[in-house]
Image (tube, rainbow, N blue to C red):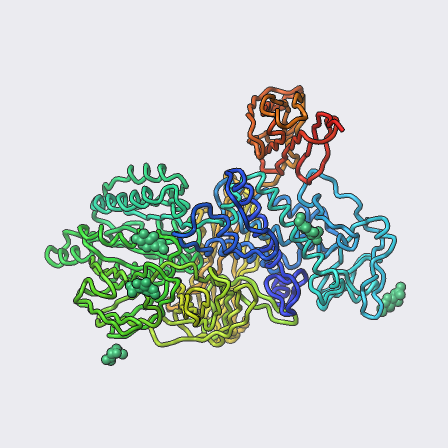
Amino acid sequence: MLLILVVLSLPGLVRCFQPLFTFDGNSSTHRDITQRAVLRKTAEVCRDIAASEGRDFSLTIDDSLSADKVQRACSSTGTSTTLLSSVIFQTSIAGMYFSNAIVDVVFALSEEHHFDDETFQGGRDVITSGVSAVKASVKLENFVAGRWTLGRVCHTLQDFYSHSNWVELGNNAPYSTLIRPDQPLENLAGPSIPTCRNCTGGNCANNLLPDLLQQGLLTSGYFNIFSSAKPAGKCSHGGLFDQTSRQDPVGGINKDKVGSSHGSLHHKAADLAVNATIELLEDIRVAVGDRNFLRLMGLSQSSVLCFVIDTTGSMSDDIAEAKRVSFEIIDSKRGTQQEPSAYILVPFNDPGFGPLLMTTNADVFKDSINKLSASGGGDIPEMCLSGLQLALTAAPSSSEIFVFTDAPAKDAHLKSTITALIENRKSVVNFMLTDVLVSRRRRRGIQGVNSRSMSQSDAQLYRDLARASGGQAIEVTKSELSVATSIIEDSSASAVVTVFQVMRSPGRPDNFTFTVDGSLRNMTAYITGASSLTFSLTSSTGVSQSSSQSSGPLASFTTAGNLRRISLNTDNETGSWQISVNSNSPYSVKVTGQSSVNFIYNLVEAHEGAHGDFSLKEGRPLSGGNASLLVSVTGSDTVKVTEVTLFDSSGPTEVNGSLQSMGSGNFLVTFTGVPAGDFVVRLKGEDSSSTSRSTASSFQRQASTQIKTSGISVTTQVNNTNIEPGSTISVPFTVATTTNGVINNSATGTFTVRANNDRSYTSTSSSTVTIASGSGGTANSTVTLTVPASAASGTDVTLTIEAENAAASDVNYAVLRFSVAAKVTDVTRPVCQVVSTSTSCLSSSSLCASSQWEFVANLTDGVNGTGIESITVRQGNGTLNTSTVAGASGENITVATYSASCCSQNVELVAVDKCSSPANSLILDDETGPSYQETAQQPGRMQTALGRGEEE
Ligand SMILES: *[C@@H]1O[C@H](CO)[C@@H](O)[C@H](O)[C@H]1NC(C)=O
Ligand SMILES: *[C@@H]1O[C@H](CO)[C@@H](O)[C@H](O)[C@H]1NC(C)=O
Ligand SMILES: *[C@@H]1O[C@H](CO)[C@@H](O)[C@H](O)[C@H]1NC(C)=O
Ligand SMILES: *[C@@H]1O[C@H](CO)[C@@H](O)[C@H](O)[C@H]1NC(C)=O
Ligand SMILES: *[C@@H]1O[C@H](CO)[C@@H](O)[C@H](O)[C@H]1NC(C)=O
């Protein structure tokens, strides 16, 4: 353990393609490589789908693709009326490159994760078992977990091209064997074969031994940060941190950057890594199908519709309303691009909550919501937060969640866990609280009779959670609920963005300005607050309207309970608007619109040192310390970001970030000395494309989720991210108190520890940790997590470890994600054998319609295989029939009979086995060669050329 602690705190330990950024302006990073591959493969899949549906697809697929371009090209229906947003796609791509980058932190010392030390077998096992886990996750529709695993797998695959001599051997194609567990790894330089000689005068261009290159033997560099020992004559990785590279033979062979030992081959290695990543993505695509592949890539326009509903006795009106509004959304959007990408429903009462329903089938959702009935309970608080927790972990990040209840939460102790989840997932939680006011009145009148009633502090819990997420706590009577649910319909529109949001608690009169830009449509403002609250609006041209006018030149609005929904008329009124609110009670203001221009952001953490880079930071930034964000702007190639601030939405504090452009709309933003508080990210910029006027239009966007700072540091030390079913892992963690972002090594104190996981797996931890005096200001402890033997491969589990100070005034946490992955036993691909073909097609294509051709093939997964799960036609429009017979040694043989018109002489069949091991596909191509032949032409694919004898 000590070893790992030391390593993780070492500065700048980067020995692969840089994870996220390069500052030499010229090298490719894992982020670039992953993004290029994902964009190209996604575009190819969209192109193939378009071709199969007879649609045009005009996008040129090359390295100039952006997420916006791919998203636009992939959206099949007319784009003129619908605003597109690439936020979901960009968030998914970021998920993949962040998990890719984290391999350098979690697996810093593992040679097989980086193909160091000639660990080719180990490296390939990392890849192929990871790919199986990705396929298993997709099968369970666990796309978030699938992406997370995929990013990690890509890291190892990509490192091969930088760390081995594959490029130096003159190869121009990826080494496909790395994704094929059933193929032998050949031509490896054995342990006793010398591979390198000294670099001369710092020049490593010719340090690989000529014999090695002549014989085509594969090797990779040795790497060690502690010891210079390596086997005699072996190459090193090279670079500042690699001690082995100072040992004879000195120097290295890595191509991580243009300045590396073999840096002149950096671009070649990066390009091959892109092509290898594309090949890996194709393998997954073949196994999971085009539709699921696009979902894995996150190519979705629409968000999920997610309801968490109290089902106790008094809730029948609310349930009826949830049903009405969801049916309306479903029926009006079915078949369009705004149709929710999934539906999530979580019922709760007391003592029960769940189960969670998550489906892409609107009818299944309708059926489930129809079956909800309000019963029982009635006089006890409900398990609201437990239900919300399920929804938060299942929904994709940045989802909007609606909670319907009329009772206090019985499980209020989950508040800090829910807050951590909200921060982690960036989802927005809105509460539809009915009859809070009525109950309060009743309670005053008839003491004790209506104990479902919510006290102010009960309601405050919901308000606090809403606020932390950027959502709203709407308090209405049951009869007003149907007016308030218009916010649910608003949130299901396409490309919704937040322009401005602020909170005043306690309330005070205040004026707020926000910028309306030309790309915004359908702007809506929401003000929650006491019924005595008044407000007025002033447009950029000085037109005013007060709240005494419910319909006027600038807006029309409706009121339901504490919510005013204001529909703004911003036509030709771009520029600075003002809302003045007059209230001494707490209130919130939120201004939204629809626009393609938006941004995503992630907190990142610097690794200091010579080649400093960043990785995703989960948990809260430290009060008084520095914080960094990676910000990506979507929706326009012409946007210029001018300002990114951390904005305290309840007070005057605003911290300005310094911006560093990383190209393609990405910015690294650094904040120094972030004070204690709750912040949201606000971005301002100029877009020269959005208006016809010659001047650029200013715009602003605001993130919903609050970023809270903490004076507590919680760090974990894990060296694995996969868990086998039935096993237990230990997660060591360290708690410390910090001052201005630095560990205070004379501090002492006791902290409450909470470890929660979203699967309710057994987990143990001590309930407190104590920093003793003389301990250097830190305390160590361990959490264990046990995955049940019955857990399916592809399940993900998120573990949150929280530490709270004794005064319960400060909390910080660490978030860890694991994938459940059973050992893969079936590594063989399905085998396909063509039994017979009839080739009666005539050579004259004008007569093709009058004749048919047919073939029969036997497909098996072998005696030890798990069996064939599916056979599908990937290309060709003939008829496929399958039947199953028993083979000689008892294995199942699937007999595929395919017949087609001679006008359609190509067919590609894809067979996928149950274990998600590599898919195999058979391509029959009735065009070339006089006789039947099998060639392993494309990796992972058996290509069969079947000819009828061309007449010369
Ligand atoms: C990668 O693949 C593309 C398209 O197949 C090809 O044009 C390119 O040359 C390949 N790159 C390398 C470095 O082999
Ligand atoms: C390689 O370089 C090292 C250090 O410069 C030197 O000690 C050693 O003798 C050299 N080996 C050969 C074979 O030249
Ligand atoms: C808001 O603006 C009005 C007029 O522009 C001004 O009279 C008033 O003092 C301002 N209120 C606050 C709280 O700044
Ligand atoms: C704005 O709202 C109207 C009516 O709600 C809708 O028809 C229109 O499509 C929306 N505009 C955009 C850009 O989505
Ligand atoms: C906005 O401007 C356009 C052209 O500049 C004009 O045709 C349209 O009538 C204007 N709309 C309003 C509401 O003033």
Whether residue 445 is situated above or below residue 886 in the rendered picture: below
Position in image of residue 561 (x %, y %): 20, 58
Dividing the image into 4 quarters, which one contains the C terminus? top right
165 displayed left or right of 520: right
860 displayed left or right of 81: right
Dividing the image into 4 quarters, which one contains the N terminus? bottom right
Ligand 4 shows up in the quarter that is bottom left
Residue 800 seen in this snapshot: yes
Whether residue 572 is situated above or below residue 916 in the rendered picture: below
Position in image of residue 597 (x %, y %): 43, 61
Position in image of residue 335 (x %, y %): 39, 41
Whether residue 641 is situated above or below residue 71 in the rendered picture: below
Point out the residue furthest to the front here: 846
Residue 490 seen in this snapshot: no
Point out the residue furthest to the left here: 445
Position in image of residue 445 (x %, y %): 10, 57
714 displayed left or right of 475: right
- Give the residue drawn at x 46%, y 54%: 88
Residue 66 lies in what quarter of the image?
bottom right
- All told, the count of numbered labels is 0
Q: Depth check: 427 or 416 in front?
A: 427
Q: Depth check: 172 or 414 in front?
A: 172
Q: Depth check: 96 or 809 in front?
A: 96
